[in-house]
Amino acid sequence: GAGVSQSPSNKVTEKGKDVELRCDPISGHTALYWYRQSLGQGLEFLIYFQGNSAPDKSGLPSDRFSAERTGGSVSTLTIQRTQQEDSAVYLCASSSRRADTQYFGPGTRLTVL
Amino acid sequence: AQSVSQHNHHVILSEAASLELGCNYSYGGTVNLFWYVQYPGQHLQLLLKYFSGDPLVKGIKGFEAEFIKSKFSFNLRKPSVQWSDTAEYFCAVNAGDMRFGAGTRLTVKP
C-alpha cells in the first residue's frame, strides 16, 4: 500500500503561533514515531506510539510540544507558542512493531520567523 | 543510555573510490542495526539492516555492512562509489528504542 504521508510539506509561521503537523502511517503499522531533524544534526527522537498503550513522550523537548494519535492511525504533532529554535524538519515514521524497520514520511519543514 | 556514533561528518570521494563509513554504538545487549540513506530532496530510505545471522549484510545498490559485536560496530562499505551515491547516511540502533547517529554526508565527485 501507500507509504507514510505527512502534511503539510512546508509550514512557515510566526513566532508565538501554534502549529499542527499531521502524519498518516502505513496501514496496519501499530508503531508510530516522531523525530526532529535540524540542519547538520541527526534525528532527534520526540515521541513514540504503540497501539493503545500510553505513548513514550521522553523525547519531547518542552511542554509546548504534544502529540496524539487518534484511532490508532493518524497522528498530530502540535507545537504551541512556536519559537525560532523549533525550525526544523519534522519526520514521522511507522513500523509493524517497535524493534522492526521504520518507514519514514517525507517530513514537514517548519520555519518559524 | 544507548548512543550511536558516526565518526565521519563529511566524506568526499571520487567516483570508483571505495567507501567505508564508521558506526559504533554503546549498548551491550541484543540490538537491531540499520543504515538509512537520504538522497538530496528525498526522504529517508532503508539501505540495509541486521537482526541476526550472518554478520555481513548486503543491501541495495551494492552496499554492505558488517556487524562486529566485539567492537560494537556496524560499518557501511561499498567497493566502488558512484556520483549517484551522494547523500546523507544515517546509522541507527534499536534495542527497544531506535537511536540514530548524527549522519555522514557523502559527496561523490564525478
Image: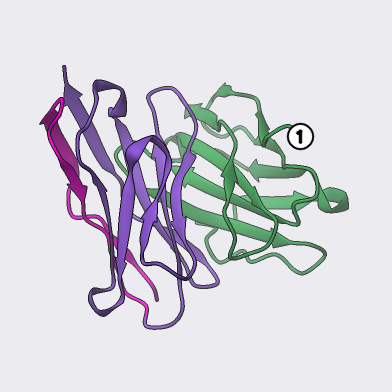
- How packed mark 1 is, by other alpha carbons closer than 10 Å (few <14, some 14-19, many 20 or more), is few
Tell me the chain of label 1.
Answer: A
Quadrant assignment for the C terminus of chain B: top left
* Residue ID for mark 1: A1
> Is A90 left or right of A8, judged from the image as shown?
left
Outermost top residue: B110
Which of the two residues, A72 or B110, is positioned nearer the viewer here?
Answer: B110
| Chain with colour purple in the figure | B
The question of residue B16 being in magenta is answered with yes
Identity of the amino acid at label 1? Gly
Which of the two residues, B19 or B93, is positioned nearer the viewer here?
Answer: B19
Q: Is residue B103 above or below residue B61?
A: below
The question of residue B32 being in magenta is answered with no
Residue A21, by quadrant, is: top right
- Which residues make up the magenta segment? B1-27
The tint of chain A in the picture is: green
Which of the two residues, B33 or A74, is positioned nearer the viewer here?
Answer: B33
> Is A47 left or right of A68, judged from the image as shown?
left
Q: Is residue B46 above or below residue B23?
A: above
Q: Is residue A6 above or below residue A48?
A: above
Q: Position of residue A108 (x, y in %)?
A: 56, 30
Question: Can residue A65 be seen?
Answer: yes
Quadrant assignment for the N terminus of chain B: bottom left
Q: Position of residue B50 (x, y in %)?
A: 45, 62
